[in-house]
Amino acid sequence: MRLSELSESSGVSTATIKYYLREGLLAPGRQVNATTAEYDETHLRRLRLVRAMIQVGRIPVTTVREVLGHVDDDSLGRTIRLGAALWALPHVAEPDEEDGHVRAAHHDVDQLLDTLGWSNAKSLITISPAYRSLVVAVATLRRLGYHWDDELLVSYAQLMHQAAILDLDFVETHPSEAEKVETAVLGAVLVEPMLQALHRLAQEEESARRYGFE
Amino acid sequence: MRLSELSESSGVSTATIKYYLREGLLAPGRQVNATTAEYDETHLRRLRLVRAMIQVGRIPVTTVREVLGHVDDDSLGRTIRLGAALWALPHVAEPDEEDGHVRAAHHDVDQLLDTLGWSNAKSLITISPAYRSLVVAVATLRRLGYHWDDELLVSYAQLMHQAAILDLDFVETHPSEAEKVETAVLGAVLVEPMLQALHRLAQEEESARRYGFE
């Protein structure tokens, strides 16, 4: 398809598409003559991915370029490729390892992983931003003086594991390795706000069931 | 306790506590003489709540004041009181009702609620920001050309309903109505980042289980 058709199919303006091409976020089309290039389904898919990261995920262009670099690096194994792309996405602040609450939170999280039997994630701990995010979240609870119930934390983790199983089952329905990795990145950008909205709506439903409106 | 002790117990500086007092986010202590006021456990609890909203939730002071107004309004029923406080928390952009994708998303979400049997939440739809957030999330998926699997959406919603049951069970372990409402607000601020971190860590664990590290 031509640039104008790519614009129409994607709902992205031709000016924005040209900007993405200049920034290297989208591969050039196949040049058919001096002024015309031809684009295909892979361009359309990539364009949607870029759009989702920039518009919904509010991810800076340089980070999008970095994420796409990992998405396209087929020399990496799948776990690393999925991980490398996700790890380039924005995360919360890094934990301050000098802080006593952070050290205690490391201990809490390590114990949680033992209880859960998440032994595979344990070997990722030294490099995983998700692990550090969890330490920050638990350290915040501690700093504010909340002693969270351990069993509650385990129950939340088990629910999120079920969500992760749904995520990966959905990723695996896609035929090519490239689509699998793209879907995983999209999931991180698009599914998280949806889960948050569903969670809040579920709280309203459950509250209304229990307490009514009186 | 004195102001200095309140500062020590909470880890919040006396200057910040005085600022919260001036802004009306914290009730004045009981004046024991011209220069000294006495604070108690309710001040400490409120201080932690304010701290969590401002530092973790990054909620503006005027919004914090509005949320606390609802938290303290015991003329309201519990569902409304929980809801009114949560609804004042920051939410995503409002849906643009002129947009075709938004209209289609309303239809999707209404159908989802029917499938789930969330009939109590339905009566909140006209006023619930969580409902509008979900419509925005689904409209975004549609705009980007993703046809999400209906069954997948139902499964995610059921997991989030289980999370909401855990939330409310935990809220109910608190003795007073004021603490129940405070815990619900805290949950919205503190539990959401923790669920997000657990979700990402679970994705890494599940990915490593399925694909190893090769």
Image: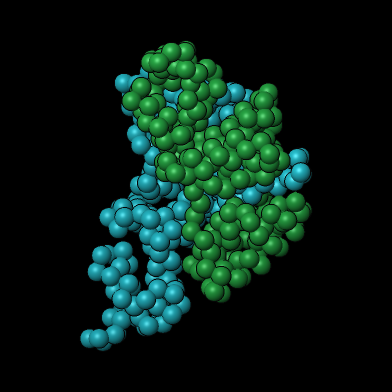
Chain colours: A cyan, B green
Measuring 59% from the left and 41% from the top, which residue is drawn there?
B70
The quadrant where residue B165 appears: top right
Position of residue A62 relative to residue A118, above or below, is below
Number of on-image labels? 0
Measuring 60% from the left and 71% from the top, which residue is drawn there?
B103
Position of residue A113 relative to residue B102, above or below, is above
Residue B82 horizontal/vertical position (percent): 64, 40
Residue B101 horizontal/vertical position (percent): 55, 71
Left or right: B62 with respect to A35? right
Q: Nearer the viewer, residue B141 or A187?
A: B141
Residue B143 horizontal/vertical position (percent): 50, 69
Q: Nearer the viewer, residue A120 or B26?
A: B26
State the residue lying farthest toward the left.
Answer: A34
Q: Quadrant of the C terminus of chain A?
A: top right
Measuring 35% from the left and 37% from the top, which residue is drawn there?
A93
The quadrant where residue B138 appears: bottom right
- Work out whether residue B146 can be spotted: no
Left or right: B107 with respect to B90? right
Left or right: B142 with respect to B172? left
Q: Quadrant of the N terminus of chain A?
A: bottom left
Position of residue A83 relative to residue A71, above or below, is above
The quadrant where residue B151 appears: bottom right
Q: Nearer the viewer, residue A43 or A187?
A: A187
Position of residue A101 relative to residue B24, above or below, is above
Q: Nearer the viewer, residue B69 or A200?
A: B69
- Work out whether residue B97 can be spotted: yes
Measuring 40% from the left and 78% from the top, which residue is drawn there?
A7
Residue B65 horizontal/vertical position (percent): 49, 40
